[in-house]
Image (spheres, coloured by chain):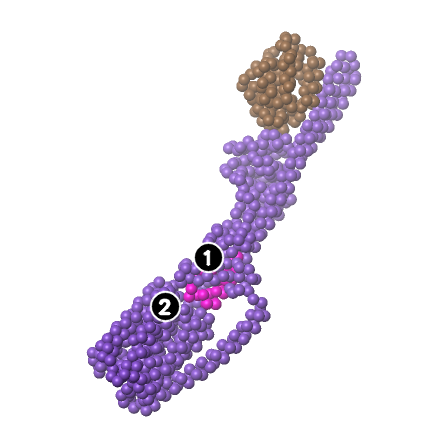
Amino acid sequence: MGHGSHPPTTCGVRVLTVDDQELFRGVARDVIDATPGFEAVGEAASGEEALEAVARLSPELVLLDVRMPGMDGIEVARQLGATHAATLVVLISNEEGIDVPSAAQLDAVPLVRKQDFGPRLLRRLWQEHGPVA
Amino acid sequence: MSATPHKSLLDQDAAARSRIAREGLAEGAVTVVGAALCALAATITIAGNESEYAWLEGIARGLLVGGPIAVGLYARRRPPFARFGALLIGVGFIAFGTTLAEASSPELYALGRLAGWTIEPLIVYAVLAFPTGRLQGRIDHGLVWATLVLALTLYVPTALFVERFPEPVHWSLCHGGCPDNPFMVTGTEPALIEDLVRPAREILIIVLFAAVAVRLTRRLLGATRLLRRTLAPVLVVAIFRFMAFVILLLARVAAPDSEAVRVSLWSLSLSIPLLAGAFLEGLMAWRLFIADAVEHVAPRLTAHPQPGDVRAGLADAFDDPQLDIAYWLEERREWVDGNGATVAVPRPGPGRWLTEVHDEGRLVAGIVHDEALRDEHAFIDAATTYAVMTFDNHRLSTEAAALLGEVQESRARIQATADDERRRIERNLHDGAQQRLVALRIKLELAAERLDATDAANAALLRQLGSEIDGALDEVRSLARGIYPSPLSDRGLAEALRSAALQAALPTTVLATGVRKRYPREIESAAYFCCLEALQNAVKHARGATAVVIELTDNSLLRFEVRDDGAGFDTDAAEPGVGLVSIRDRLAAVHGDLSIVSAPGRGTRIVGRIPLAPHSGGPGLEFGSAGARPRLSGPAP
């Protein structure tokens, strides 16, 4: 399901969305498209697809759903932390932090609620956690 | 319950009554006739007897007849010895025949002497067949037959050829000289008789009597304590009689007028009454032993004896170490031992006997025991009672275990179904309502973003709607969490407990080292909800508690402990609340158990343990070991 057809450009922050739910991937794409300085470069529907897509697309920001069948977001984030330290990984979840205690063990991986997602949150995440500093 | 084939009780009663009546009549007749013969024998001996020992000789003769008949009548009354009793009565009647040898008439004298020869095979039979009246094995049969053949070939037929019967003899006092043999058909006595037949038959009879003594000794040495006690007096008298016999035969040739002949004659005269006394003593020893055994077996076998205890108890009390009990399981169509293991069809070996035990017409057990006990009602009653009791006990407990197992399985199934349903609802909420609300919330934010530059008022309105959706989402999330926490579905027990700890009203620490990430779903659910209940209990009831620790360990069984530092309580005084009862039920469904350790001022520890090894299947028809059962333990001390 990876949308690898987008050619690499330099027009914005390259964002990969990972979620097993089509509904969220759709609205995330709308948000990224509507946010200047960000570009949706691909989507993945599972943890395994996500690792493959990151290797292929080299995104700068990965929006990673916590709760997925098979390899979940926390495991993907742990692996990406080891292999793609430069990539900003953001865990997104329907649940709150208290529901995902193990997410807290991952240093420098912010966890945000899906419902708070939008252009403002996307910009803030990149400002606070991106490589700008 | 019975040890005999089933009959209707009425039939049994009628048959038993008529049998008892017949036996009573026969016994009365034998008693009267026996007493008369006894008196007659004594009278014949005393009448016209001018010896200074006439009275003594009369009493000895009376005892010779009366002793065996009296002891025989006594033995007849006890089922194990009924056959033997009849045999002994026969000995008494033939002994009366020997009294004829005291008559002055040559014909009666000769008949009396013939009776004296024919009684010997019967005495050998009685000695070897004591106490049951049945000969055991070929050797015993051979000895009895050999004695009989010897009497009928080398003794009785010589009556046609001899001038006089051998003298002196214990059957006749021959005061005034023994008569000549009136049955002699030849003119002169063939030398063959004196030179060959008499020495040969005397050597043979000594050999046979010696063989009987050896046989009796060997039987006694290999016998159970019961039989040893019973046989010992008989062996002593049998050896005494044998010695007296040998001395008479030797002294009669070597020194016919010696004291040795007189002593051996007296000894032989008294040996049959003595033998009757020895039989009586043996029977008394038997009765005492059985009474003792029955008395001793009862305390050993309490209300719920295990099959092994029953076997050991009976074997010990009746001193029959080889005693064995096999139980017949109709459902499995096979014999099993006390431990439920299949065994071969019980077959008695030599000297052993199989008693089948029936309960309400159904075969329930087979007891292989000392053949001597085959007709001993006291033993059969005790053994069958305990065997049936044990069988019933274990059948009931097996049925109860099967029912308990079914209840257990169904409880586990109900719990698993309920958990599955909760998981499904939570997943539907997550994938359905929550996702749609989230998408709607994001789309509103996006719309607000677009309006920010042009229509700030409407943008604010949209964001306000977004907040409303946040509220709805919080409620849905809380609902889903209550139904089935997603961490438990997704990331296992420890993670779910950590999540619960983060939401607890008291500072709560989760310690989980050496614990697997995932366990079977039913075990995770049971442990999680039990910990959650215990945690809520601590928050609600543990006065003064400042912290809670949830500790998980895994050592072939999953153990959880929820402890607080609150006021604690007296576990004996407190009734377990609904929460604790539901914890117990939850744990029991996964074969786990629960204990509560608390005391005033010492905090409370709620400890649950769930076995992880694959559980053995539902209880089959097991016998003996109870197998794994849920243990609903009460509060620990």
Tell me if residue B247 comes above or below residue B376 in the rendering: below
Give the mark nearest the N terminus, 1 or 2: 2
**Subunit ID for the residue under disc 2:** B
Tell me, yes or no, whether the highlighted magenta stretch contains residue B120.
no
The answer for how far apart the CA atoms under marks 1 and 2 are is 27 Å
Q: Could you tell me the amino acid type at mark 2?
A: His
Total marks placed: 2
Q: Using the image as rendered, state which of residue B475 and residue B487 is in the foreground.
A: B487
Q: Which chain is brown?
A: A
**Subunit ID for the residue under disc 1:** B
Residue B112 on image: x %, y %: 34, 83
Give the SS element for disc 2. helix
* Quarter assignment of residue B169: bottom left
Side (left or right) of B57 relative to B370: left
> Which residues fall within the magenta stretch?
B367-391
Residue B256 on image: x %, y %: 22, 81
Label 1, residues with CA under 10 Å away: few <14, some 14-19, many ≥20:
many
* Residue to which mark 2 is pinned: B141
Q: Nearer the viewer, mark 1 or mark 2?
A: 2
Q: Which chain is purple?
A: B
Residue B193 on image: x %, y %: 25, 78
Q: Using the image as rendered, state which of residue B344 and residue B493 is in the foreground.
A: B344
Residue occupying the point 63% across, 8% down? A10
Residue B206 seen anywhere in this rendered image of the structure = no
Give the SS element for disc 1. loop
Q: Are marks 1 and 2 in contact (CB under 8 Å)?
A: no
Residue B346's disc number: 1
